Image: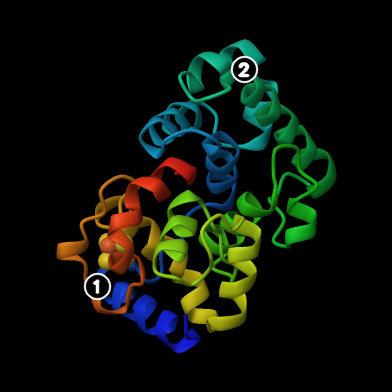
């Protein structure tokens, strides 16, 4: 796909889905990121809320028992492992960063449970910095519209987007593509006949291969 074509698609979607100035507390984003792996947002968000209502600082979470954290975040996937990770992450932040979530990627990735995707998410959503968090929705849309080949790893998709988008678009592209991926370019049965970027998308031309693609690609 031509780079300009991708920028055009993102700009169109941005006008529909982007929330400019969207910022949340970096600590809340970090907690969300650690809990979200292999779990649907509809499960992660309520669990995150339950935990943060009771303990919204690294100190408070680090003082809770693992069992209590488990009960609060259940039924998040791998909740037992994640409860331990959340406690470890909070202790690490207290010890190494004076209880503040760091605002650079290398420091973030030292925190237990934080990989490149969560680190980018914290920088993008929490600090408003031009990092691109490529989750399953973002990666699927990037593949379908033809930006990257099917089967591309999120890290590679992030690298490709990094080189094409300007800083202000990098800050909003995650939110834009997640919303678009949840409502129109859905994992199963994308709503192509109601898609605002239909004219620019390569996937619609290949719908007859959809079943084959769906059976091979992890959504
Ligand atoms: S035309 Fe279909 S596959 Fe392409 S971006 Fe739109 S919804 Fe997704």
Q: Residues within 10 Å of mark 2 (few under 14, many from 20)?
A: some
Residue displayed at 62% across by 53% down? 117
Q: Secondary structure at mark 2?
A: helix
* In this view, the mark in front (1 or 2): 1
Q: Is mark 1 within 8 Å of ligand 1?
A: yes
Quadrant location, ligand no. 1: bottom left
Is 112 left or right of 12, judged from the image as shown? right
Front residue of 78 and 67: 78
Quadrant position of residue 7: bottom left
Q: Does residue 180 appear in this view?
A: yes
Disc 1 target residue:
198
Residue 119 lies in what quarter of the image?
A: bottom right
Q: Which mark is residue 36?
A: none
**Side of 46 relative to 12 (left or right):** right
- In front of the other: 71 or 136: 136
Numbered label tally: 2
Residue 55 in percent (x, y) is at 55, 29
The quarter of the rendered structure image containing the C terminus is: top left
49 lies left or right of 35: left
Image point (40%, 63%), residue name: 144
Which numbered disc covers residue 80?
2
Which residue is the extreme one toward the right? 96
In which image quadrant can residue 13 be found? bottom left
């Amino acid at each position: 796909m031509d780079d300009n074509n991708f920028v055009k698609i993102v700009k169109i979607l941005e006008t529909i889905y982007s929330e400019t100035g969207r910022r949340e507390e970096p600590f809340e984003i970090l907690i969300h990121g650690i809990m979200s792996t292999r779990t649907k947002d509809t499960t992660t968000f309520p669990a995150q809320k339950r935990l943060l209502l009771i303990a919204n600082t690294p100190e408070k979470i680090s003082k809770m028992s693992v069992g209590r954290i488990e009960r609060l975040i259940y039924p998040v996937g791998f909740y037992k492992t994640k409860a331990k990770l959340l406690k470890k992450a909070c202790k690490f932040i207290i010890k190494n960063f004076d209880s503040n979530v760091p605002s650079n990627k290398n420091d973030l990735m030292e925190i237990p449970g934080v990989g490149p995707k969560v680190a980018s998410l914290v920088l993008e959503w929490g600090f408003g910095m031009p990092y691109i968090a490529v989750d399953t929705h973002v990666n699927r849309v990037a593949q379908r519209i033809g930006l990257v080949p099917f089967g591309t790893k999120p890290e590679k998709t992030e690298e490709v987007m990094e080189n094409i988008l300007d800083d202000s678009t990098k800050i909003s592209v995650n939110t834009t593509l997640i919303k678009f991926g949840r409502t129109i370019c859905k994992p199963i049965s994308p709503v192509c006949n109601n898609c605002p970027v239909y004219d620019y998308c390569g996937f619609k031309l290949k719908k007859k291969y959809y079943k084959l693609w769906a059976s091979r690609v992890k959504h």
